[in-house]
Image (spheres, grey):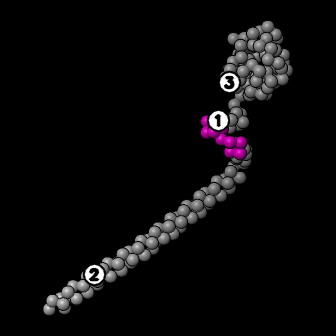
Amino acid sequence: MEIGERIKKIRTDKNLNQSEFAERIGIGQAALSALEKGIRNVTDRNILLICENFNVNEHWLRTGEEPMFIETNTTIIEELAKEYKLDDLEKKIVEHFVKLDSGHREAIKNYVLSLTTEIGNASEIAATTAEEAIEAEVEKELNIIRQELLDEKKAKMLSASQKHNETG
């Protein structure tokens, strides 16, 4: 595979059309087309810009020897962002977290764990409070029903007593 073909491979792997790719490396679409076809020589500047913009291994671009891409924290974070549909803030959080020293990461983990414990406790309290409110409401409704039944029974007894007095 010639260098022009490798440039085209980078472009297609990144899902870019010639105009988009050319713009990223500061050349025109026609110039990129000529590079990809081997009509025009690839300059050191072209190589530098391609490698910087797309995390391409310069040795691969020049020779074809793997690996094609340079894996960096940024590249890995970009892949994670795509896979998990992270927004810009979430990407920044991940990026800054991995750059912290282990002591600071540990402090953040402990803080997050304490938050989850607090949230868990708050959820339990809220659930208990909600449960108690439901029980109180049921108890109130039961008392109303109990009173209605008592009134109904008393009325029947009174009615039966009155009928008994009238007949007896």
Dot 3 falls on a residue whose secondary structure is loop
Instruction: Say which amino acid is labelled 3.
Output: Asn
Residue 88: in magenta span: yes
Instruction: Say which amino acid is labelled 2.
Output: Lys
Count of labels shown? Answer: 3
Dot 2 falls on a residue whose secondary structure is helix
Choose mark 2 or mark 3, whichever is in front. 2
Query: Which residue is painted at 71% across and 52% down in the image?
Result: 104
Q: Mark 1: give few (<14), some (14-19) or many (20+) Cα within 10 Å.
A: few
**Mark 2 or mark 3: whose residue is earlier in sequence:** 3
**Residue 79 seen in the current view:** yes
**Residue 35 seen in the current view:** no
Q: Which mark is residue 15?
A: 3
User: In the rendered image of this protein, does residue 161 appear above or below residue 62?
Assistant: below
Spatial separation of the CA atoms under disc 2 and disc 1: 71 Å
Q: Which residue is mark 2?
A: 153
Query: Which residue is painted at 77% across and 9% down in the image?
Result: 38
Location of residue 13 (image quadrant): top right
The residue segment tinted magenta is: 81-90
Q: Which residue is mark 1?
A: 82
Location of residue 80 (image quadrant): top right
Residue at the extreme top: 39
Q: Which mark is residue 133?
A: none
Instruction: Say which amino acid is labelled 1.
Output: Lys
Quarter that holds the C terminus: bottom left
Frontmost residue, 60 versus 39? 39
